[in-house]
Amino acid sequence: MAELALRTPTLDKDRVLQWLQKYGVYAGVAVLLVVNIAITPHFLSAENFRTQAVQVAPVIIVALGMALVIGTEGVDLSVGAVMALSASVVALYLGYGLLPALLVVALFAAGVGLANGALVAFIGVQPIVATLALMVGGRGLALVLLPQLEDLRNPTLASLGSGDVLGFPYLILVAAVLALIVAFVVRRTTFGRQLLAIGDSRPAAQLAGLPVRRVLIIVYVVSALLAAVAGVLATARLQASDPTSLGNLMELSAITAVVVGGTPLTGGRVNIAGTVAGAVLIQLLTATLIKHDLPPSWTQIAQAVVIVAAVYAARGRGKR
Amino acid sequence: MQRTTHRRSLARPVAVSLAAAVVLTATSCAKSEDDAAGGNSSATAAGAEQKVASPAPGSKTCTVEAYGAEKIDLKSATVGFSQSEKEANPFRIAETQSIKDEAKKRGVKLLTANAQSQFSKQISDVQDLLAKGADLLVIAPLNSDGWDPVLQAAAAKKVPIVTIDRKINATACKDYVSFIASDFVEQGKRAADQMIEATGGKGEVAILLGAAGNNVTTERTKGFKDRIAEKAPELKVVFEQTGDFAREKGQQVTEQLIQSNPNIKGIYAENDEMGLGAVAALKGAGKKPGDIKIVTVDGTRNAVQGIVDGWISGVIESNPRFGPLAFQTLDTFTQGEEVAQDIVIEDGAYTKDNAKSDLGKAY
């Protein structure tokens, strides 16, 4: 009896938190859209939506890989460094043509992903430590390969960054297609189920005879490859390779998008639609503050508030 | 029950990881600000060689006697040079090269070290240079504070120190001889002059700020705003957002700016990279060269090329070539003559009048 009386309010709170965790990110996006349409001059225009979408596309692409890694109860801090590395490699090999350059980029990224995955899967290094090593080393390598910013005047690369199909920029199309593929993999494939099982409990997955090491390695390679795609697209858009600052803080933006989107850091569950919405939420938040010329420090504080809210909402689930 | 415990125990390392990630990325961010702040010294009117703007007559000077060192012949001396940041941006590359070139030209033995943006390494670098027998030191400090151990070691060996581009918080002519750098407030003022000329002194302008909490940012902003308020009150600064001294950030912020403020007439970028990012944003939005006037500070080759191409209206130069002035100061000082304690460099500028002819002088 007493137990029941104690439980009832908790259940209500849980329900609110659950709702927030599931739909809060979409509600947030909707609120920001409505508020901006109401108060921000020139917000309701095709060019503006295009700008927001183009700016958020690389974040979404990186966050997709991050969501998979977090689904295995890991984290990938090296994504920003991989972006820088791919920028350097593109600049170095562009002379041989765009396609060969992209192949070399893929090789480098796969190498970083393999190293991350091997450290985590075979040596048993904690993901934070393993990917931290590659985060520091990856950017170091990027700067060794290309010590300073270099302008790229390659028309094919430039069109990759600014071209479009029926008014939809390549960046947005690439991000959308990749999001659909990753969502399909998570929901409908054996690999997706194995990944979530590992995130839920690695020992149990091992006991059940799942190919834990293979899945982990593939997940880190995919994360690195997606970061490389984002790095190439950002470089194409900038028409310059900037290994010093490209991808700085990207790991943080991606983790934020994933967490805000309702994917728990404890693994075992991945919400791809939420991740995309999480990235869009942060983008709209930043855009709102910039467009109204509020002090840049406010952006950081606002992001912190969103993260805390998301983590608070997720707490409800952890308790159950 | 057991499941709950398990989840909690898992959640903890993840939370720690996230916190660590925050700290780490914050550090890397600070580093990039430092790198970008590299655009912080000065140059003269599109000239390769630095010229002295001050000292004014009667300003404080220093001599070998007052400093407590001994006269030596620079030609037979060993000079140690400690660079703060890795040579990853045009400014640092040109700065180190200039020191090396001048040492070679004068036939002076030079020892060099690079602290890779780590202050503890710079401290040990300088101590190494002293141990290797440097008679004179040229330091490009990473930080202004925390130099006491080095200053004591140098004082014990009576080794004179000249600092370039950033100042050490210590007593001139006691802990170090002279500080050579440019006046960032003045750079901001001259950028404002260029902006007033380009826009006709009317309309709305935006500022792409450098990294927050950096004296280069503060001073370049102050100079710009003061001069606008004083000379062109009809020019309104309606937008100030940070571009972190980085090209991509400059591009992204400018994209937001030109949509929300379509009336904007000019953009003042506090370094060349952000200005070039603004150019990329304008190109992407289908603007024509000159639709929006851009003024930047630094004087890198890409920005000066931007003037030639019509996208940038003016570049206030920040000359990194400290070599000649640093060695001249050391030479004068070691011969027993007096040198100024604060040597401020006269800054130059590139406009459409001289951009093409002086492109070769940009770094």
Image (tube, rainbow, N blue to C red):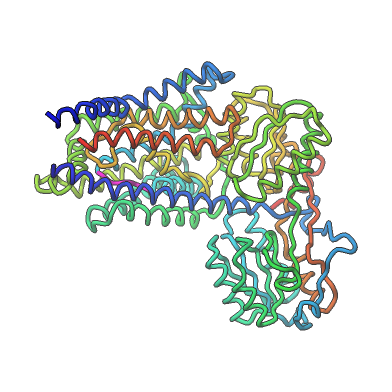
Which residues, given as a range, are shown in magenta?
Answer: A73-77
- Residue in the foreground of this view, choosing between B180 and B320: B180
Q: In the rendering, at what x and y percent does residue B195 appear? A: 77, 35
Q: In which quarter of the view is residue B114 placed? A: bottom right
Closest to the observer: A163 or A273? A273
Task: Please indicate whether residue B41 sits to the left or right of residue B128 in the image.
Answer: right
Residue occupying the point 37% across, 37% down: A63
Percent coordinates x, y for residue B191 in the rendering: 76, 41
Is A151 on the left-hand or right-hand side of A176?
A: right
Tell me the quarter of the picture where residue B84 sits.
bottom right
Establish if B80 lies above or below B259: below
Left/right of residue B154 with respect to residue A155 in the rendered view: right
**Quadrant the C terminus of chain A occupies:** top left
Seen at 31% across and 52% down, the residue is A116
Q: Residue A153: give x, y in percent of width and height.
A: 57, 40
Tell which residue pokes out farthest to the right in this image.
B57
Q: Is residue A246 magenta?
A: no
Q: Is residue B60 visible?
A: yes
Q: Is residue A94 visible?
A: no
Which residue is at a point 33% across and 55% down the rendered structure image? A129
Count of all numbered marks drawn on residues in the image: 0
Extreme-front residue of the structure: A2
Q: Residue B27 in the image: x percent, y percent? A: 48, 53
A74 within the magenta span:
yes
Question: Where is A263 relative to A86, above or below?
Answer: above
Instruction: Looking at this view, name the residue that lies furthest to the left.
Output: A208
Q: Main secondary structure of the magenta part?
A: loop
Q: Quadrant of the N terminus of chain A?
A: top left
The reply, left or right, for residue B309 in relation to residue A94 is: right
